[in-house]
């Protein structure tokens, strides 16, 4: 499958960024095979954009060593060098230790939420059923928005996002029953956590959801045996 025929989503960011993300994804998972030519005119037509942003994207991909351009021949996907994977592992082993030790303040709750959404949407797309995607996206949108309302009171949210590792492993390994059980447990666990927060009074608020100094929720009830009168009216 070539980059020219890969399904395209809505543009995000600049047109050059959109073209870059689309082509990079196709190159990384070998939808564009090593050595396959990349025609900027065909790609631009497929993406519905001009050739200039496609050329900018191809230049960035050249810096990433995912494509190579030859004068008067064109641009091609680079070969995959499998002669010494130890070189790449050595670099990743050192640098990824650094990224794993990021300050937790940098990876805030909303960043984790974006990762959570990305994993869910990826699994929806992987189902290959567009109707199932359409059905799932709407409740997931609502669940995400509800979760964002209480993120500051969900201390275990990072753990919920971490559950994706076992789920994705089960999917990749073809353990469909285990993946289904893990997915259901993940959704139910998130729901329980959010419900617990929504039911608990916020600090500084009463159980009715009002600050203690706010006074009663409305006018006092009339005393027994007396009829409540409308304001401003006197009895005869």
Image: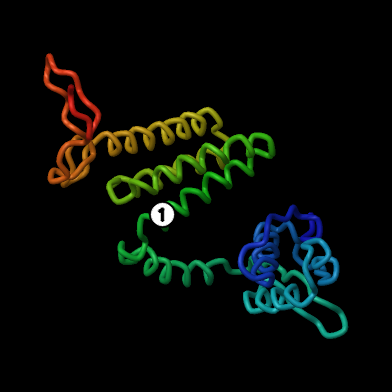
Q: In terms of depth relative to the viewer, which is nearer, 218 or 67?
A: 218
Which residue does the image show at 58% across and 47% down from the upper left?
122
Which residue does the image show at 77% across and 62% down from the upper left?
47
Which residue appears farthest toward the front when viewing the image? 236
Quadrant of the drawing holding the N terminus: bottom right
Disc 1 is placed on an element classified as: helix
Query: In the picture provided, is 49 more to the left or to the right than 14?
Result: right
Which residue appears farthest toward the bottom when viewing the image? 71
Residue 128 position in % (x across, y down): 69, 39
Graded by Cα atoms within 10 Å as few (under 14), some (14 to 19) or many (20 or more), the crowding at tag 1 reads some
Quadrant of the drawing holding the C terminus: top left
Which residue does the image show at 17% across and 39% down from the upper left?
206
Residue 77 position in % (x across, y down): 75, 69
Is there any visible trace of residue 36 in the rendered image? no
Which residue appears farthest toward the right when viewing the image? 72
Give residue 209's quadrant in the image.
top left
Is there any visible trace of residue 121 in the rendered image? yes
Residue 157 position in % (x across, y down): 34, 46
Query: In the picture provided, is 115 more to the left or to the right than 217?
Result: right
Query: In the picture provided, is 171 more to the left or to the right than 161?
Result: right
Which residue does the image show at 56% across and 39% down from the upper left?
138
Q: According to the image, label 1 marks what residue?
A: 112
In this figure, what is the number of numbered marks? Answer: 1
Q: In terms of depth relative to the viewer, which is nearer, 208 or 13?
A: 208
Give residue 30's quadrant in the image.
bottom right
Residue 129 position in % (x across, y down): 69, 36
């Amino acid at each position: 499958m070539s980059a020219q025929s890969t399904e395209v989503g809505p543009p995000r960011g600049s047109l050059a960024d959109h073209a870059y993300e689309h082509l990079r994804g196709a190159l990384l998972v070998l939808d564009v095979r090593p050595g396959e030519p990349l025609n900027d005119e065909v790609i631009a037509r497929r993406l519905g954009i001009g050739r200039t942003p496609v050329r900018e994207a191809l230049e960035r991909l050249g810096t990433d060593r995912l494509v190579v351009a030859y004068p008067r021949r064109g641009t091609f996907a680079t070969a995959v060098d499998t002669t010494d994977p130890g070189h790449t592992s050595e670099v990743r082993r050192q640098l990824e230790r650094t990224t794993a030790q990021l300050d937790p303040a940098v990876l805030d709750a909303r960043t984790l939420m974006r990762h959570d959404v990305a994993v869910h949407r990826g699994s929806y797309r992987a189902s290959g059923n567009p109707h199932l995607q359409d059905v799932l996206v709407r409740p997931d949108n609502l669940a995400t928005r509800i979760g964002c309302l209480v993120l500051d009171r969900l201390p275990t949210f990072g753990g919920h996002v971490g559950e994706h590792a076992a789920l994705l492993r089960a999917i990749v390994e073809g353990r469909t029953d285990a993946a289904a059980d893990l997915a259901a447990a993940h959704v139910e666990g998130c729901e329980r956590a959010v419900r617990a927060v929504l039911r608990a009074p916020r600090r500084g608020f009463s159980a009715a959801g009002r600050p203690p100094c706010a006074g009663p929720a409305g006018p006092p009830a009339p005393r027994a045996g007396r009829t409540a009168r409308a304001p401003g009216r006197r009895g005869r």
